Each structure stands twice: as C-alpha cells, then as structure tokens.
Image: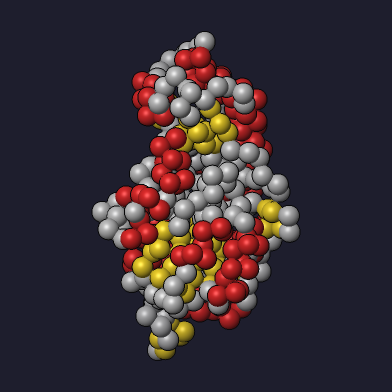
Amino acid sequence: MTLQGSHKIYVTQPALPPLDEFIPYLQQIWASRQLTNSGPFHQQLEQALRDYLGVPHIALFANGTLALVTALQALRITGEVITTPYSFVATAHSLLWNGIKPVFVDIDPDTLNLDPNRIEAAITPHTTAIMPVHCYGHPCDVERIQKIADNYGLKVIYDAAHAFGVHGRDGSILNHGDLSVLSFHATKVFNTFEGGAIVCQDAKTKQRIDHLKNFGFVDEVTVVAPGINGKMSEINAAFGLLQLQGVDTALQKRRAVDARYRRALTGVRGVSCLPVREGRANYAYFPILVGEDFPLSRDGLYEKLRDHDIFARRYFYPLISDFPMYRGMPSAAPANLPVARAAAEQVICLPIYPALTEAEVDLIIGLVAEPLR
C-alpha cells in the first residue's frame, strides 16, 4: 500500500488549533503589555490545569528540564539519586546540573519502568531520593516505590514528562511522590510550544518552587534562594489555555490510532506491544518490541520505515548510561542493566498523533507486517 503524493510521517506531530483562534489571546497580551512574571494567562493556566489534572498545586515553567532541575532544588536533594537508564537524557542531566550522582537501576521487563525489586539493593548512606519515570505514560508501581522511600526516608520525584492526564486506580498519577514534573514540549500530548510544570501537594512547597523559578525573589528587594529564570511566558500560557480546550479530542484520536495498531499487530510473529494498563491512558507513544523471530532486526525495520519516509524513533536508544558523562559510573555497567539494554535494542516507537490518518496507519502496519507475508 502507498499513499498519494510524497510526504514524510514523523513519530509525532503537534496538534495545533486554528491560527485565528489564537489571535484574540495575542491581542490581549499586546493590550496589557505584560509578557511574563506570572501574568493573567499564566495564572489562568495554572488554575485550569489544576482542575483538569486533578492536582492541588502546579507551578508552570519555561520547559520541563528547568522544572526537573528546580524540583531537585526545591527538595534540597543531594548525594545520590536512584533513577532509570531508560529515558530521555534530561532525566539524568537534571541530576548532574545539581551536582547529584545518578545511580542507575534496571527496569521491569513488562512495564519498562524502574523495577521496584532492584531499588533497595542500590540504596547507600548517600541516597537521598528516587527519580522514576512513567515511561511512555505507563504508570510506575507507585505504591511499592513509596513504601521503599518511606522505609529509608527518601524523597520521590517522578519524571512525568510522558504522563499528562494519566490516571491510575486512585486518580491522577501526578499526585504520587513528593513532586511530579511535566513537560509541555511540542512532542507531548499537551503542549505550550515549549513548557513544563511541577505538581506538588502543599502551598508551602509551591511557594518555594515559585521563588526558585524567579531568581529567588520574594519581592523586589528580597532574595531567599539562588533561583533561576524558569518562568513561562504569557504567550506560552495563552497558547496552553487554547490547547487545553482541544486536548480531550486529541486524546480520543490518539486512542483510535493505538487501537488500530493493536488490532493489526497483536499476534504478529516477532512483534510485541506493551499491554494496556489499568486506568486512563494518554496514548503518548506506541512502542513495539522487535524480537529475534521477526525477519528483520529492530534497526533493519527502522531503516525500512525511513526508506518509505516514515520516521519512527528508537526511544530510548542508546541508554542514558551509555553516554560519555555516565558510562564510567559503576551503576552504568552493562551487566547491571540487562533488561534496559535489551529494551534499548528492541523498541521502536511507531508514529502516533491526532492527525495521523487511517490510511497512514495502515501503510505503517503493512510495512511492519510485510516481511511476514
């Protein structure tokens, strides 16, 4: 099967509202001349996201990486932090930027999230926190991770960059841990061009986060912490308010793409889909694992798709622990991370986004299944 014309299909594509619907927001910004510093759109978006996500407090940021860096500062994390090697590099980079040593622990083969069974063995007298990732938007085993943290007096900061709108059995997954950090990058299910946020559970922590993201200022003559400039602009916040109006429709379309892939690929020899999880998903990614009994290697399938202008991604390859700034660490040794290493060699994320058509999905399915015919 081929499509008419020549165009490229990327792993994702941001859902954008009609441009003319954004113009009135810009006109209000031009009229107020307030471009940043917690303006009216910034405040409105914080309230709207609290309501939509079902969280008590949220602090907006210019991007998710600044939010991660600030979350560690907000809880005064030092020493060592247990985290996953199977994520985007910003997870571990945020630790290095704070002078913290990442300690990599292997992942669970079924969820590809940090494996709770391996966390305790990695705890040392220098461990102060655990930073798991809700990989692909699939919730971590939050109960077991919290129990370990409580037993050892550790903080828990979730990198929830993939987990916008995800719910578990007891509501928003973002309400677990001490803090959860979101990304509103253009590749995410909800975006503000660039942006991010920290979810916290109490007003005092929210106040500290707000001070830290604005240079540590309390007022124009009082600085209480060595903060940074992490503020979200009014233009990004206004865009987020508009995007939030269409996010449920976007998620429904993602769900339809996910279902179409699953129907066609379930049972295909050598291809495994991650199982559907309990609760409300956001269908942020569609990863498949390419096994040894598939006619092509994972990289062979990756190249074949590229030859047809389909740009799937090998999320996450290489492992974070393989990059030069990490690979000399004892916890980064390949022998310590066999499950993560196997996933990094097998996973390929197929395109998924609201505007992806049924014909495009069927083309991708055909190219994946073709070697078996």
Q: Residue at x 56, y 58 (%)?
A: 117
Q: Nearer the viewer, residue 98 or 1?
A: 98
The reply, left or right, for residue 314 in relation to residue 179 is left
| Residue sitting nearer the eye, 71 or 17 | 71
Outermost residue to the bottom: 221
Q: Quadrant of residue 80?
A: bottom left
Q: From the viewer's perspective, tell me whether residue 147 is left or right of residue 339.
A: right
Q: What residue appears at the point 69 percent right and 54 percent down from the top-left corner?
A: 168
Q: Position of residue 329 (x, y in %)?
A: 31, 61
Against 93, residue 212 (above or below) is: below
* Residue at the image point whose x is 47% and y is 74% from the top: 128
x, y percent for residue 282: 62, 45
Name the residue nearer the viewer: 205 or 24.
Answer: 205
Given the current orientation, which residue lies at the most extreme right position? 170
106 or 303, which lies in front? Answer: 106
* Above or below, 188 relative to 328: above
Can the viewer see residue 342? yes
Tell me which residue sits at (60%, 41%) in the image: 283
Residue 359's quadrant in the figure? top right
Q: Is residue 213 visible?
A: no
Q: Residue 195 appears at what percent x and percent y?
A: 47, 57
Relative image position of residue 182 (x, y in whole percent): 52, 58
Decide if residue 180 is on the left or right side of residue 84.
right
Quarter of the image for residue 78 reads bottom left
